[in-house]
Image (cartoon, rainbow, N blue to C red):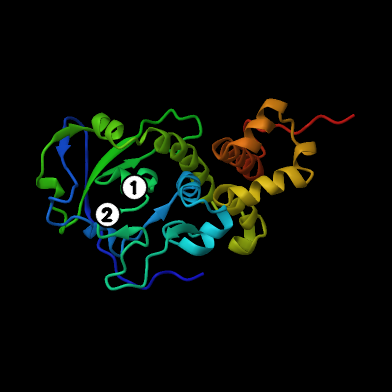
Amino acid sequence: MKQSPDKVVYGSRTEVTGGGFYFACHPGVPCFTRCCKNPDMYLYPYDIIRLKSRLAMDSETFLDTHTYTAVRDNPWFPHVMLKMSQKQDRPCSFLTGQGCTVYADRPFSCRAYPLEPALSRDMDGRRPDRYFVVRHPYCKGHEQDPYQSVEQWIADQELGPFIEHNRRWAAIDALLRANPWGAKGLENPAVKMVFMAAFNPDRFREFVFSSSFLKRFDIPASRKAAVEARDTDLMGLGFDWIEFLLTGKGPLAEAKTG
């Protein structure tokens, strides 16, 4: 899979250590939807769940239609990126003249902007999260009222579940950055298995229920039912399995034999 060759404009970052920031985004702001054109948009596992459900797609179809993979700052695992349309200025495929057609389920990066959470990569969650405000030269939203705290922005943009799930993914990502694949690197077949568990929930569910997975691991009946019914529970199981696969540790335990 190919990286996008187009240049993107990155912004400056300022850490929010107290107080808050000015920002608003609405049709009255001169740059409205400018940030929806040719962005370098990372997608996280929970983004995939929200978007594929919104579009009534299975995860494999969604990935094939709306994403591509690219190796960015982590040379040991591919990132999933949102594919832009081929129209002039390469706007997001979900953008229309009236705005975003998936707004209620928009990805984390869109939802959080201009706030950029630097979530703890600690498995135990003991390190505090940090928050930055990102500024792009074209963005006029920083000149708008209201002035708000990080907590107010998180609540207003309904970021809570995204941060919760992304915090767990950040801990998994820290493990992936240490090259757990050995000499084979990205050619190790385990890379595809981890990718499936993280970003292709419908394929992972099929794997869980059609392989020896449930015989190998001690999973209570209540959790099996939750995993079968809800993508977020399936994602949690996927994260547990990835941690076990990479470290031999974590909340997932092998079933006792004999």
Front residue of 70/235: it is: 235
Which residue does the image show at 63% across and 30% down from the upper left? 251
Picture layout, residue 246 above or below residue 35: above
Left or right: 101 as drawn, with respect to 138: right
> Is 71 placed above or below 159 here?
below
In the rendered image, is residue 70 in sight?
Answer: no
Where is residue 217 shown, x and y percent of the image? 74, 35
Q: What is the three-letter code of the residue carrying label 2? A: Gly
Q: Residue furthest right?
A: 258
Expressed as whole percent of the image width and height from the top left, the position of residue 109 reads 34, 48
To which residue does mark 2 refer? 99
At horizontal 25% and vertical 55% (from top left) the residue drawn is: 98
In the depicted structure, whether residue 89 falls above or below residue 103: below
Check if mark 1's residue and mark 2's residue have beta carbons within 8 Å: yes
In this view, the residue in front, 72 or 143, is: 143
Q: Is residue 4 left or right of residue 186?
A: left
Residue 11's tag is: none
Could you say which quadrant of the image residue 245 lies in? top right
**SS at circle 1:** helix
In the image as oriented, which residue stretches furthest toward the front? Answer: 98
Tell me how far mark 1 sits from mark 2, CA to CA. Answer: 8 Å
Measured as percent of width and height from the top left, residue 131 is found at: 28, 38
Amino acid on which disc 1 is placed:
Tyr
Which residue has dot 1 on it?
A: 103
* Rendered residue at 52%/43% (across/down): 172
